[in-house]
Image (cartoon, helix red, strand yellow):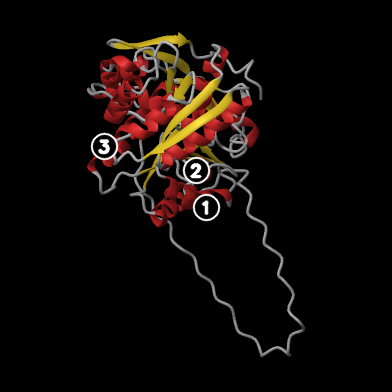
Amino acid sequence: MPGFATRRLCTILAAVSIAALSGCVTPSAPPPPPPKPVAAAEPAAPHQLGADAAEFLRLPNMAKDKTPLRVGVILPFSNASAGTRALANGMLKAAELALYDSGNRDMVLMTADDSAKPEEAAAAARKLLAQGAEVLIGPLFAASVTAVAPVARDRGVPVIAFSTDRSVAGDGVYLLSFQPQSEVKRVISYAIEQGHRNFAALIPSTGYGRVSEDAFREAVISGGGTLGTVEHFSPSAGAVMDQTSAIAKSGADAVFIPQGGALLRSIAPTLAFNGADASRVKLLGTGLWDDLTVTREATLRDGWFAAPAPDAERKFVDKYRDAFGTAPPQLASLAYDAVSLAALIGAGTPYHRFTKAALTDPNGFSGVSGIFRFSADGAIDRGLSVLAIRPGGFVVVSPAPETFEHKGS
């Protein structure tokens, strides 16, 4: 981007190799027969360091009397997919942009590659930890997060990852991603607030569908609604006539459909054909509906779904475009938020600042797409808007909250 290279506060550094140390022992005479063996005590995991170390990475222009805020970034730069490589590079650019915007002259980003192979992800984590990383940002894929987690945990270093799979969160791993659970809870809660009580659902037989269905059932029951007919369909089958007929006959006044794209645009008119009158049955969805092509289907009009407000990322997109001459990839804002969060928390005492209490602050943080906070189990809670589908676009019918003050702990 014009002028950005000369204005950057820190340089993104390439790999640094660390030599391995080996030792030897002198064998002694054979010991007498041992007593009955007993279980050895499990060695305690090492704690994170309390001070800077000479072997940790430091830029030449950094003050000698200050401990740099070293942030490790693990992304799939060499992935076999060109699209994934482009996403990784776009996320790194967003991370650089956040670094520059933070104004923190003592912060340095250190990168490592993970092509999506777990063993590579673990090696990347070990490399960054050897360089003194206090926090790891990434990886992107669930299997890589699982591989990185124990490596980072042994050093007491938290991981802020981008996977949407909540099963890999917890015990030092925090997921800064868009997870369907938050979207489902938000839209179902809003529907109940608006007087809808009888819920049915059309669920795709996919991993995303299963996660969304669990969240749907929990949201309906906890909100005091009535859980009615739930039908499943295979996205590859194409036909959903039987399922939509059962839903239309269920008497539900709200139908949840965690499906997007062309299939969603075919399901809605099939529901209407089978008797689900749009004047009395509200269609509900997830962030998969955040696609302007759905506005072309008349039977989806006035359907509700939860997502960031349509203009939430506009400022970030404009800033990224000005810096790099192109629009950011869809997930680039997550990398920007992760580095911004590291800069914010990094104001504390070196090697004791990224605590669980700091990361799970119940007041949350302000990000590109709105407020967010991490729960104790590493999942993310986002402040989302509820949007209605209208011809040519989306309308906010319930604005995203600006604070978690009234949302509980």
**Residue beneath label 1, please?**
151
Query: What SS does tag 3 mark?
Result: helix
Numbered mark located on residue 133 in the image: 2
- For the residues labelled 1 and 3, the Cα–Cα distance comes to 27 Å
Marks 1 and 2, the one that precedes in the sequence: 2
Marks 3 and 2, the one that precedes in the sequence: 3
> 128 and 243: which one is in front?
243
Residue 151 showing in the rendered view: yes
Image: 215 above or below 167: above
Query: What SS does tag 1 mark?
Result: helix
Query: What SS does tag 2 mark?
Result: loop
Residue 33: image quadrant is bottom right
- For the residues labelled 1 and 2, the Cα–Cα distance comes to 12 Å
Location of the N terminus (image quadrant) = top left
Location of the C terminus (image quadrant) = top right
Which-is-in-front pick, marks 1 and 3?
3
- Relative image position of residue 192 (x, y in whole percent): 56, 17
Q: Is residue 347 left or right of residue 396?
A: right
Image: 42 above or below 57: below
Which-is-in-front pick, marks 1 and 2?
1
Which-is-in-front pick, marks 3 and 2?
3
Marks 1 and 3, the one that precedes in the sequence: 3
Binning the other alpha carbons within 10 Å of mark 2 as few (below 14), some (14 to 19) or many (20 upward) gives many
Q: Residue type at mark 1?
A: Val
Q: Residue drawn 56% across and 19% down?
A: 197
Q: Are marks 1 and 3 in contact (CB under 8 Å)?
A: no
Residue 238: image quadrant is top left
Numbered mark located on residue 86 in the image: 3
Residue 356: image quadrant is top right
Image: 12 above or below 382: below
- For the residues labelled 3 and 2, the Cα–Cα distance comes to 25 Å
Q: Is residue 300 left or right of residue 62?
A: left
